[in-house]
Amino acid sequence: MTKQSRIRNSKLARRIVSAEEAAAMIPADATIGMSGFTGAGYPKAVPGALARRIAAARAAGNPMRVSVWTGASTAPELDGVLAETDGVDLRLPYQSDPVTREKINAGTMEYIDIHLSHVAQAAWRGFLGPLDVAVVEVSSITEEGHLIPSSSVGNNKTWTDQADKVILEVNSWQAEELEGMHDVYYGTALPPERTPIAITRPGDRIGVPYLKCPAEKVIAVVETNAPDRNTPFKSPDETSRRIAGHVLDFLENEVKQGRLPENLLPLQSGVGNVANAVFAGLGQWPADGLTAYTEVIQDGMLELIDSGKLEVVSATAFSLSSDTVEKFNARAREYRDRIVLRPQEISNHPEVVRRLGCLAMNGMIEADLYGNINSTHIMGSRMQNGIGGSGDFARNGLISFFLSPSQAKGGAISAIVPMVSHVDHTEHDVDVIVTEQGLADLRGLSPKQRARQIIDKCAHPDFRPALEDYYQRALVSSHGRHTPHLLDEALSWHVRYLSGGSMAS
């Protein structure tokens, strides 16, 4: 071992091999648990070497395919290279890679879209079948053989526990000062042995700052030095700022009404420009001591930490722009006491989300007149990315927001439709819908009252008259009057788009 080595355990240091040698140890038709969550902490070298092996096998007339489980989305160096070789038989639980998406929607790759908090339980119960190999990125290995996670934790605890064999990538690009930032809880159990998870504040630490993995399981260690590849964020545009403004006005009123404390409750948000616009706006919030209990730490959250507004954030991964990553890596030691990275079964755990009263802000593809939400499918059958953790927080948070621009594709698609073409979040899990047009507070409203709010507050003016016309005719002609629908027209907007390129009549 060199002085600079991140591999401080002598036994594991003797297992250093090349990425190609490690990939050769993965059985054909294996199920592989890989690290990675929103472009952070995924293995950088072994997936590419495995893709080259799969391509060579196919060229030799011996097709090879594997199944891949991760924490969430990864990057082209993992999902992309494997999908390009037609090397993935099944993928779960979330993805955002365009090549992977193409294969899923062409029907050549099976895909299981699952709540992120449910993956570990499903793996432990055996619903998903055996896990042959784990390929996990870590930032270092201690003298005792403990694994210090890198920029995401995701399902890595489950993968290293469940896999028959483990391949480690030790990435020296990741900040050494990540050591001490993680909180890996080993107290989970299956029913009937479960006990309460003792998190009552976002910053509570209840585990250990490393992953445990028996040395005999580790069949290979690969050294890398490669950055995470996160999607760069665009500066908030006028639409994002208007959506964020409606959310902030709503929160301010909730404080005035005495329904929220001045420092709010723990914040959760999906990834994206709208979420960062909300956090940018919170930079002017009148009270300090804000907290977040969420999946992913984004640029806006680090800015709030820097400003002193955000006291602590708990998540399972980072999703930072390249400029912000540089700042974080240079100052990781400063952030270590303000950030907790947990396994996703804890970061997204319904028990904890409910106890803390999270304010859940997530994106949507479309909403219907009664508040049902489609966050996964384009025109009913084409998978976009997946449900991710939005369901974990929407059903269990104190207030559940769904956010979107009111139209897409240059005005050809309305985000508010008579009936959603796919349901991910039922009306029962949706409290507030927000577009740049306005905010519909649906709490305590019947279906017809919800429809009135959504049409008036959220629909784009170009589509509002058609929604009003549909709703008024449904009030007269629907089979029932509780949730009025015209079944022969409910999905006609989607049919019209698929046949003519626009939802407009």
Image: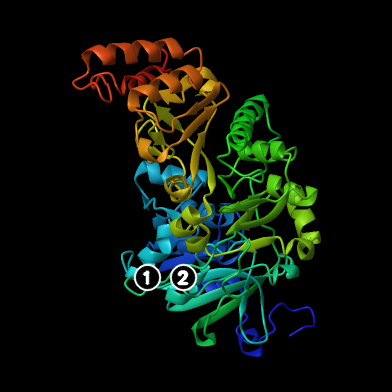
Q: Element at badge 2?
A: helix
In contact (CB < 8 Å): disc 2 and disc 1: yes
Quadrant in the picture for the C terminus: top left
Is residue 183 shown to the viewer in this render? yes
The image position of residue 182, as x and y in percent, is 63, 68
Asked if 238 appears above or below 120 in the picture, the reply is above
Is 482 situated above or below 138? above
Give the CA separation, mark 2 to mark 1: 8 Å
Residue 212 occupies quadrant: bottom right
Residue 158, numbered label: 2
Closest to the observer, 460 or 2: 460
Q: Between 481 and 238, which is closer to the camera in this rendering?
A: 481
SS assignment at label 1: helix
Give the residue at mark 1: 124
Asked which quadrant contains residue 424, the reply is: top left
Camera-nearest residue between 47 and 298: 298
Toward the bottom, the furthest residue is: 11
